Amino acid sequence: MLSILSNQGSASMNNVYMSRQPLLNRQSRIIATRLTLHLGRDGSMQDAASALGALDDIWPRSQKPVFISCGHSSCDAGLLDWLTPENAAIELPAAALLGPQGPDLIGALQTWQPTTCLLFDAQAAKALSVDVPFRFIGFDARTFSLAQLKLLAARTRSYGMGIAFNIETGEDFRGCMDAGLTAAAGWFFTSPTGTQAKALNPAQTNIVRVLNLVRQNADVQEIEAALKHDVAMSYKLLRYINSAGFGLSCEIQSFRHAVSMLGYDKLNRWLSLLLATASRDPMAPALMYTALLRGRLMELLAIGLVDKSEYDNLFITGAFSLLDALLGVSMEKVLDAMRLPDPICDALLGNAGRYHPFLELAQSSETNQGELIAEQAGMLGLTADQFNRAQLQAQSFAETMEL
């Protein structure tokens, strides 16, 4: 059956959907992920623990921390029924530690000793005195000014590394880094900034030319000749193909070898990624990671729902959905230069089509709107467990593809 259907267990009945926020360091690289749990109306922390436990077989095993936020739900000791992976960090509001259920939660934390992040608020000073070590101190950037964050980061540094959540602008991100915080979370980098260029630059134009040749099934020699005009592009292409995310058993030595091993359809996917690498945006590393994750997520969500021949197109739709931000050119101008199938163009231009529901769901996974995620997933016939598993699998894929 579908790979994302396996190991559902009882979690699929809990309707616990997850959304994501990336954490960026001052080099604009994604160094961690924040997963927010959206529980159903009658959901409990035991449901959350069950949903997380069902994901153990595909949990990202990298060294990158994964922060777990209970969102609008009240965190209690029931969440500790989940055997937390080493790279998981549980976010704890001060109220959860100091309220009526606090003693049970503190006892569970002392027993299981997971990595924790204290969410700083008016009661945080008192919460810092409880007998629980914190590795991270989290600050909601919507609550504190940059001046306050700088002061709080300095005062709490001895308790844990400072992290800012819910950053909304690039200016706020830079302010948080200047304030001495370790990382900041948010999707501020996915919106195009500045004045858009009127056309693609020469490097981007050459990549589009090669892409169009591949999509036309041009002769291998003709494509090789076009690649030789840009040695850097050829090098990047081979690095992508030989990365761990591609999963090949032998190393690809040349473009001709790549064609013989992969065929034009698969090669088209990886050439598509090269278009994004031509970006000069300082946020390009984070944008590339997100584009990879979106592409893989769309592909996984569509398994069993569309014909296999369309999987690559769904990947490209997701990967291209951030091209306007990456290239500094409007989506219309990018698509005018390319010969892409109508379903891809329709989805990227917001004109509906059969790929659009998958792109909408991938984009909704980056919001804090649990009800919207549940509604869109339900319209595609996807359970919460299927959706969550696809997200984590896509995250692991994006991490293996980072170059």
Image: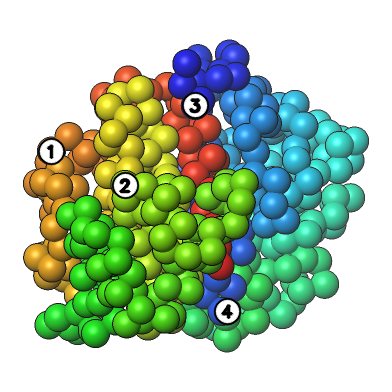
Q: Nearer the viewer, mark 1 or mark 2?
A: 2
> Which residue in the structure is indicated by mark 4?
26
- Of pointers 2 and 4, the one earlier in the residue sequence: 4
Tell me residue 401's x, y (percent).
54, 58
> Which residue in the structure is indicated by mark 1?
353
- Of pointers 3 and 1, the one earlier in the residue sequence: 3
> Of the residues shown, which amino acid type is indicated by label 4?
Arg
Tell me the element at label 3: helix
Tell me, yes or no, whether the two marked residues, 3 and 1, touch with CB atoms within 8 Å.
Answer: no
CA–CA distance in space, label 3 to label 1: 24 Å
Q: Horizontally, is 55 left or right of 156 in the view?
A: left
> Which residue in the structure is indicated by mark 2?
265
**Residue 147 visible at all:** yes
> Of the residues shown, which amino acid type is indicated by label 3?
Ile
> Of the residues shown, which amino acid type is indicated by label 2?
Asp
Tell me residue 144's x, y (percent).
52, 70
CA–CA distance in space, label 2 to label 3: 23 Å
Tell me the element at label 1: loop
> Which residue in the structure is indicated by mark 3?
4
Q: Residue at x 69, y 52 (%)?
A: 62
Quarter of the picture holding the C terminus: bottom right
**Residue 184 visible at all:** no
